[in-house]
Image: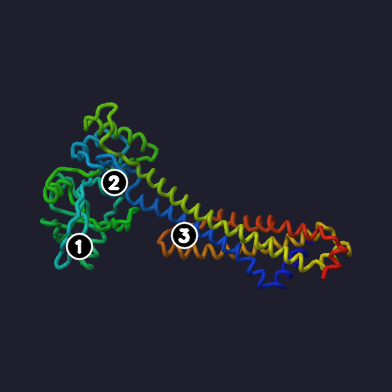
């Protein structure tokens, strides 16, 4: 019986193909827009997490001053020094390392090529904390770090821009007013979450940076890598205690430094991206409502056009529920066709958008299933009133209808 009703619905849809297609458009556009927005939003959230993960795992960022996380977000305050780094390494437990960082923009020169980049002064812990892989060569030795030897490890962008396919190991690279021997090349990481090129970097021992580039002993920030994610809050509290003591901050006085949990920042940014995508998806879902209204309108027109047919069916013994089921199934079939087409179109647009935006394609089967279920629900909700109207027609009046 149900299959016969479905065949009748399909036959009715085929009789008015153009009208049926136009009716589907609202559902198709709504479902496609929702799936596209939600999928791209999920991909953007995954990209934010992946980009921040490139900075290091389970990381705490320590900076002087009170300010927001990100470039240029820290207020002026007394910088850290090597004794602060030593205090943290000696007093913190459950950490992989503490990496001090001092940076300065410079012009790197090799042969006839030059390139504007950033030089970073740090220790060997930096490669561990930041999860950098040495693709070729080696990191600094302890003796090079202690003595401030003129050696450097360079990023992939520096290799590409200055060495043009030549092996950089053992070559002398000029940075500002001094030259250093290239002892290692790092594997590429790409752009950071803040849009900067992480591979455009020259890394030198911290004391080399202080003596040959900065002319002072200041450390701009420190990165602490925690062994287990569950220990991050404890390590953060211990680091605050150590630095408050080191910087002679009395109880009740505000810290003159900032410790940020990179994991929390990643989750916050990903959550914000997901909320924005959800809002866009909610706006797009309005077109589903428009599509439902379109289905109801067309079904009402169909009931009016087929009044005599309905009267004949009722006159020869068809039950009200059978007529109700026929028109309700027709509305549901229309909505489901629109949902299926919308799902295919939405996934296709999401795949194209993900490729253009350079974000992962993160299709969620739950979202697809929900979109399909909503399509069926729209068919039921907006098809019920026209179907009920058809079922309640007076057979005699229906037969008189011209």
Task: Tell me if label 2 and label 3 are in contact, CB under 8 Å.
Answer: no
Task: Pinpoint residue 330: horizontal percent, then vertical percent.
Answer: 72, 63
The residue nearer to you, when weighing 23 against 398, is: 398
In the foreground, 122 or 33: 33
Q: Earlier in the sequence, mark 1 or mark 3?
A: 1
Residue at the extreme top = 251
Q: Is residue 25 above or below residue 80?
A: below
Which corner quadrant holds the N terminus? bottom right
In the displayed structure image, the side of residue 217 where residue 281 appears, left or right: right
Residue drawn 27% across the image and 34% down it = 255
- Which residue is denoted by mark 3 in the rendering? 361
Residue 208 at what x, y percent from top left?
Answer: 14, 49
Quarter location, residue 60:
top left
Residue under label 1: 115
- Residue 73, disc: 2
> Which residue does the image show at 75% across and 62% down from the upper left?
327
- Tag 1 and tag 2, C-beta contact below 8 Å: no
């Amino acid at each position: 019986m149900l299959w016969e009703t479905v065949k009748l619905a399909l036959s009715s849809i085929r009789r008015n193909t153009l009208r049926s297609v136009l009716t589907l458009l609202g559902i198709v556009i709504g479902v496609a827009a929702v799936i596209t927005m939600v999928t791209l939003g999920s991909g953007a959230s995954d990209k934010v997490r992946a980009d921040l993960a490139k900075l290091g795992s389970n990381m705490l960022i320590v900076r002087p001053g009170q300010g927001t996380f990100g470039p240029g977000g820290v207020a002026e305050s007394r910088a850290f020094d090597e004794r602060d780094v030593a205090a943290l390494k000696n007093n913190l437990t459950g950490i992989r390392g503490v990496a001090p960082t001092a940076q300065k923009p410079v012009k790197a020169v090799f042969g006839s090529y030059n390139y504007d980049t950033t030089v970073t002064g740090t220790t060997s812990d930096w490669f561990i904390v930041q999860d950098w892989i040495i693709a070729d060569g080696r990191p600094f030795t302890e003796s090079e770090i202690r003595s401030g030897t003129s050696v450097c490890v360079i990023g992939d962008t520096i290799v590409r821009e200055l060495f043009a396919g030549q092996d950089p190991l053992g070559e002398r690279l000029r940075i500002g007013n001094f030259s250093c021997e290239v002892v290692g090349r790092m594997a590429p990481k790409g752009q950071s979450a803040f849009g900067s090129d992480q591979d455009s970097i020259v890394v030198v021992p911290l004391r080399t940076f202080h003596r040959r580039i900065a002319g002072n002993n200041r450390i701009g920030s420190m990165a602490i890598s925690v062994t287990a994610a569950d220990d991050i809050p404890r390590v953060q509290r211990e680091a605050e205690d150590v630095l408050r003591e080191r910087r002679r901050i009395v109880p009740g006085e505000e810290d003159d430094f900032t410790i940020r949990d990179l994991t929390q920042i990643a989750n916050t940014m990903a959550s914000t991206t997901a909320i924005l995508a959800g809002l866009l998806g909610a706006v797009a879902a309005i077109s589903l409502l428009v599509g439902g209204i379109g289905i109801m309108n067309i079904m009402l027109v169909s009931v009016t056009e087929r009044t005599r047919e309905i009267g004949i069916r009722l006159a020869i013994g068809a039950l009200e529920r059978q007529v109700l089921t026929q028109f309700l199934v027709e509305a549901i079939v229309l909505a489901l066709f629109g949902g299926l087409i919308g799902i295919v179109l939405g996934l296709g647009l999401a795949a194209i958008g993900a490729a253009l935006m350079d974000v992962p394609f993160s299709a969620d089967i739950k979202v697809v299933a929900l979109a399909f279920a909503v399509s069926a629900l729209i068919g039921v909700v907006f098809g019920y009133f026209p179907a009920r109207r058809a079922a309640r027609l007076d057979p005699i009046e229906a037969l008189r209808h011209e």
